[in-house]
Image: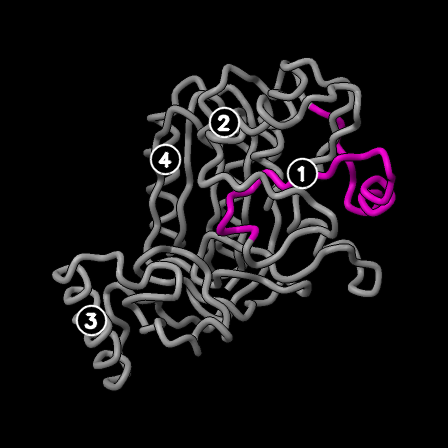
Amino acid sequence: MKIGAFYRFVDIAEPEKLQTWAKELGVSLNLCGTMLIANEGLNGTLAGAPEKLDQFFSALVAKTGALEIKYSFAPQRPFRKFQVKYKKEIITFKQPVDPNVKVGTYVEAKDWNQLISRDDVLLVDTRNDYEIETGTFQGAINPDTENFTEFASYVRENLKDKEQPVAMFCTGGIRCEKASSFLLEEGFENVYHLKGGILKYLEDVPVEETMWEGECFVFDGRVTVNHDLKPGNYFVCYMCGWPVSKEDADHKYFEPGVSCKRCFGEAKPHVVARARERQKQLKLAAERGEVHMTGYGPSDD
């Protein structure tokens, strides 16, 4: 199954009409995933049979213009359903920035290592704490944010030298569009960001030259991808949403579908009971060779 992570900041005059059109087309092509539409642009990750996903993106580009798209593949459907949502922002930041008006300097994946190897460059990971848990670039600063809206406060409270070059990165590039625009608005003079994000870097930079450490968190059933953009070695704790490694699964507080070492003991008894029942139903469905409604279906694409 082919997966396409995409975005574009572009004026969408009639987002509701585009939402209806995209939903009808996506359903007809048997796609899965989520597409977000706002007046400021488009964002999402979709998956389907290669020729059908290509057909969808060709039609979408014809309507909205060129998109930034990163492709990868998975052996099964990485999403349970297909949905198209209208939002106030395609990436929630809650700051008055417009990447179409002001944005940092794009750095191609092939040039990224050279930039972040400089002693004068401050390297900042703009992703959230649970994403950084599975991997990041060598020497990158972790802002320790739970969501992207906290990034502005992190910058104002911690980044004081506005003359120092700042290089930022995120999964697919979209967060850095707003983050770099924000830093410029705050008076930073030299702002850079990785074009196409980590996914583009993993696609273009050979493993023997990489400065990436670990795996990249993605927002679908794969949970993470390795340097070959193949499904990684993590899964998500159903209770708290944090990634769980194979080593974490050996911890005494780990119970599949119920708890991990981070959240053990935090949920109320009735919530734990419901989680255990869900896990039981998943197991029974698997034994019958079926896919539970909360699981992911197999695919030959």
Residue at 70% of width from left, 45% of height from top?
140
Q: Are marks 3 and 4 in contact (CB under 8 Å)?
A: no
Please tell me how crowded label 1 is: few (under 14), some (14-19), or many (20+) other residues with Cα within 10 Å: some
Disc 4 to disc 2, C-alpha distance = 15 Å
Please tell me how crowded label 3 is: few (under 14), some (14-19), or many (20+) other residues with Cα within 10 Å: some
Residue at 77% of width from left, 55% of height from top?
211
Where residue 48 sits: x, y (%)?
Answer: 46, 58
> Where 11 sits versus 261, above or below?
above
Chain-order first, disc 4 or disc 2:
4
Residue denoted by label 2: 41
Q: Is residue 265 magenta-colored? A: no
Residue denoted by label 3: 276
Colouring rule applied to residues: one colour
Residue denoted by label 4: 21
Disc 2 to disc 3, C-alpha distance = 40 Å
Q: Are marks 3 and 1 in contact (CB under 8 Å)?
A: no
Which amino acid lies under the numbered mark 1 shown in the image of this protein?
Val
Where residue 273 sits: x, y (%)?
Answer: 15, 67
Chain-order first, disc 1 or disc 2:
2
* Mark 4: secondary structure: helix
Which amino acid lies under the numbered mark 3 shown in the image of this protein?
Arg
Disc 1 to disc 4, C-alpha distance = 38 Å
Please tell me how crowded label 4 is: few (under 14), some (14-19), or many (20+) other residues with Cα within 10 Å: few
Q: Are marks 1 and 4 in contact (CB under 8 Å)?
A: no
